[in-house]
Image (spheres, rainbow, N blue to C red):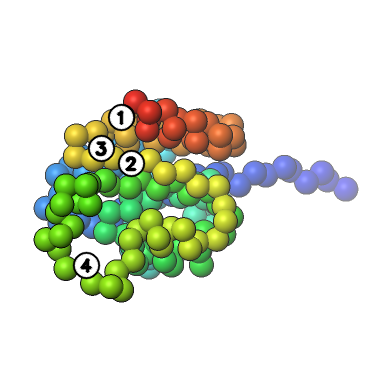
Amino acid sequence: MPQQEDFAVQKVPVFIEMPNPGAKPDAMVCQIAINTLQGLGHTDLPLAHSYDDLVAQLHLMVEKEQEPAVFVVNTFNARELIKQLDSVVGEVPLIFMRRNMFAGKSGLSEHFDLGTNTESTMAVMKNMKARLVASWNYGSMNGPDIARGVARAVDSFVKTGDFRAVERQSTLAIKTRQ
């Protein structure tokens, strides 16, 4: 009887970044992370711009004998999509890149009518199923640097499977920004 060949499904990071018309290129942090990973030799990196696009990307990955290693989500304008992630992510780790606008500290929030039913992105994230999660915060001055840091952490995670590297690098990024 012939031996069965061992076949491993390729683990690939999946990126999610909502369309942001008029955004500066340095605000498109998932695209910057993808470009960095391509420079490190990664290819075929899915980028979804909506929930339907994400589902289509995941179906395409199955056809290519790939599966998600980690989901990297730019939370800017993605609150509604984040609410739907549990239905497709399973136990796959998540990395959130959160844009800090500091509206609360600057007094800007007093000028916006947020209403009483508004859920912050962080509140939505806290209601998700338990899984490995890291959060990287970026702003207008450090978005590209943070995106490159996320890319290096994803590269390490895909190669080793050790999510602690992502967590350590996220903590280091937070300490160096303070």
Q: Earlier in the sequence, mark 1 or mark 2?
A: 2
Q: Farthest residue to the top: give it.
A: 176
Against 61, residue 136 (above or below) is: above
Residue at image x 15%, y 63%? 112
Q: Earlier in the sequence, mark 3 or mark 4?
A: 4
Indicate which disc residue 143 carries. 3
Query: Is label 3 or label 1 in front?
Result: 1
Disc 4, SS: loop
Mark 4 — residue? 114
Query: Is label 3 or label 4 in front?
Result: 4
Which kind of residue does numbered mark 1 sit on? Answer: Arg
Pointers 3 and 4 in contact (CB under 8 A)? no
Disc 2, SS: strand
Residue at image x 40%, y 48%? 96
Indicate which disc residue 137 carries. 2
Left or right of residue 18: residue 127: right
Pointers 3 and 1 in contact (CB under 8 A)? no
Indicate which disc residue 177 carries. 1
Closer-to-camera residue (96/148): 96
Pointers 2 and 4 in contact (CB under 8 A)? no
Closer-to-camera residue (63/79): 79
Pointers 3 and 2 in contact (CB under 8 A)? no
